[in-house]
Amino acid sequence: MCAKKKQIRGFTIVELLIVIVVIGILAAITIVSFNGIQNRAKNQQTISAVRSYYSALKAYGIDNNGVLPSGNGCLGSPEAYAANPCYIGANTYNYTASITNALAPYVSTAPNLPGDRVTTGSITASGIFYYSNGQYIGFVMLSTDTCPAIAGAIPDSQFLMTPHIYCKIKLPTT
């Protein structure tokens, strides 16, 4: 009698390639979905921080007969900007301790800010920008084309930085 030889069957190269392509497609879908969720979380973090500073400015104005802190600069902790400006355009604006110190009694701790920097053309922005001369607060929203309503603030303007947007809201009046 002749002993039957056991045949070992493996996967063909085509089957392996199909599995690799399917895994690649699933990974791409997961990464895109994760980035969307991550950007929404960062936007909520920014909205929360802007709301805190808007409320702090309103309280400051009430305590100071309608006068808001003078100057222009980044709001938040200096670590949030890591020695980078919060706005670069026709002018460059950096973190200013005087504005933060003026608002310190109204903001118990500086809100966390996403560290994303957005650039388009000659403008680079990150964090929250306080501009007393122009009477607004500016901030970046990631991967969206609309500015949110914040704490009853009146939208001033917006600047599309595809796929992001730079939003401005008017400073509070008392």
Image: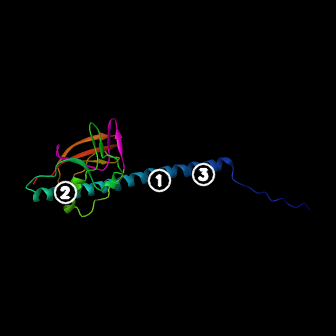
Q: Which of the numbered marks, if any, corresponds to residue 102? A: 2
Q: How many marks?
A: 3
Q: Are marks 3 and 1 in contact (CB under 8 Å)?
A: no
Q: What percent of the width, then of the height, locates residue 76?
A: 28, 55
Using the numbered discs, state the Cα–Cα distance from disc 3 to disc 1 in whole angstroms.
17 Å
What secondary structure is found at the residue carrying circle 2?
helix
The local crowd at label 3, few if under 14, some if 14 to 19, many if 20 or more residues have their Cα within 10 Å, is few
Q: Residue at x 31, y 57 (%)?
A: 45
- Magenta stretch: give its range: 116-136
Amino acid of disc 2: Ala
Q: Which residue is denoted by mark 1 in the rendering?
A: 30
Name the quarter where the C terminus is drawn: bottom left
Using the rendered view, name the quadrant where residue 158 is placed: top left
Q: How is the image coloured?
A: rainbow
Closer to the eye: label 3 or 2: 2
Q: In the visual, does 77 lie left or right of 102?
A: right
